[in-house]
Image: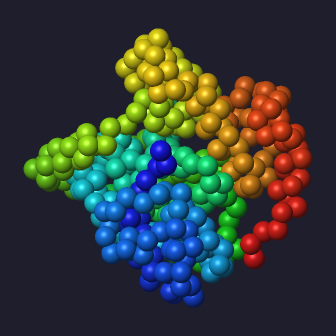
Amino acid sequence: MKPLSRSASLTNYAAMAQAAGLDPLAMLREVGLDPACLKDPDLKVPSEAIGQLLERSAQRSGWEDFGVRLAESRPFLVLGPLAFLVREQSNLRASLQMLSSYIHLHTESLQIWLEEDARQARLCFEYAGRHTSTRQSLDQAITAVYRFLKQALPEGWEPSRVCFMHEAPHDLRVIRRVFSNRTSFKEPINGIILKLADLERPLSTSAELGRYAHDYVQTLSMDTPRSTTAQVRRLILAALGSGHCSLASIAAQLGMDVRTIRRHLDREATSFNALLCEVRRELAPRYLAGPPRSRNELALLLGFSAPQSFTRWFRGEFGIPVANWMLDEADAPRPS
């Protein structure tokens, strides 16, 4: 089943497209989206179609920062009931955990997770899906969450850094306006780097509204049960580049033993290794289409212990050596 997103993801799209010199209705039809989704924010539409729409809009308009501009033009409330739940938590850690847990109610293909070490915290973003380019969708998501953090935390707060895996746009004026001088490109993650102390910062809250929002969002989540396959895919995506992506660790996070999770996946006609390979197959072309990366870096991003393991896997999955693919990417024409 293809991942779906609320059509609220396209709030203000028509006005932004027109400002960029595009025909919004023609662009929607081109990717198979009904223009009615611009009027009803709660329609469920294919996530991949929205991603294609944003990529084509960026290419046709020449606005490399189309996703950033779109997110800047609208409030965090486009997330619907989830926005209230995220805003009403006692501190930033709880807020981001709620966002990570329930973002599938807004868009099923976006994965958000929080990582911490002794020095800092990283809020990571990634899209699952077979379409190669997710740059605009990721830019849009990161911008929306960054703007929420700016509104929810004390005035003057800034993250340590906002990271993008893609190269910097040629024109940085919008990026600087939105993010000040906090952006960094060609990074190993898409995400927002925070100080550990930031996670304990209080948010302005309303306890009554928070309880109501939590109960309501939980009800919505129960109406859209997540398969074991979907949960395992989400956790593989979050753990892949950490060096700790194993069936045992994922089973522990789901509160199951390895035998039980294998049985559940078998009932859903898949396995941990099949899902791991599937996620790698989705991410590898995306990483290779981005800024130049060494084979060692690509291997680490995709969860391989050594570059040789990555190159063997790549040739077996795609039928050509990774070096040939990299040459083809280098020779491919880039949007002007």
Q: Position of residue 152 (x, y in %)?
A: 31, 59
Q: Which one is nearer the viewer's eye here, 91 or 229?
A: 229
Question: Which quadrant holds the C terminus?
Answer: bottom right
What residue appears at the point 29 percent right and 57 percent down from the top-left corner? 83
Q: Position of residue 51 (x, y in %)?
A: 54, 62
What residue appears at the point 31 percent right and 62 percent down from the top-left corner? 42
Task: Report the side of 141 relative to 243 (left or right).
Answer: left
Task: Report the side of 158 relative to 134 (left or right).
Answer: left
Q: Position of residue 291 (x, y in %)?
A: 75, 55
Figure quadrant of residue 131 = bottom right
Q: Is residue 256 above or below residue 32?
A: above
Q: Is residue 334 above or below residue 303?
A: below
Q: Position of residue 183 (x, y in %)?
A: 58, 61
Q: Is residue 310 above or below residue 248?
A: below
What residue appears at the point 54 percent right and 32 percent down from the top-left corner? 236
Answer whether residue 120 is visible to the viewer in this image.
yes
Q: Residue furthest left?
A: 208
Task: Report the side of 91 relative to 245 (left or right).
Answer: left
Query: How many numbered discs?
Result: 0
Task: Report the side of 80 relative to 302 (left or right).
Answer: left
| Coloration of the structure image | rainbow
Figure quadrant of residue 44 = bottom left
Q: Is residue 133 above or below residue 178?
A: above
Q: Which one is nearer the viewer's eye here, 195 or 192?
A: 192
What residue appears at the point 74 percent right and 40 percent down from the top-left corner? 298
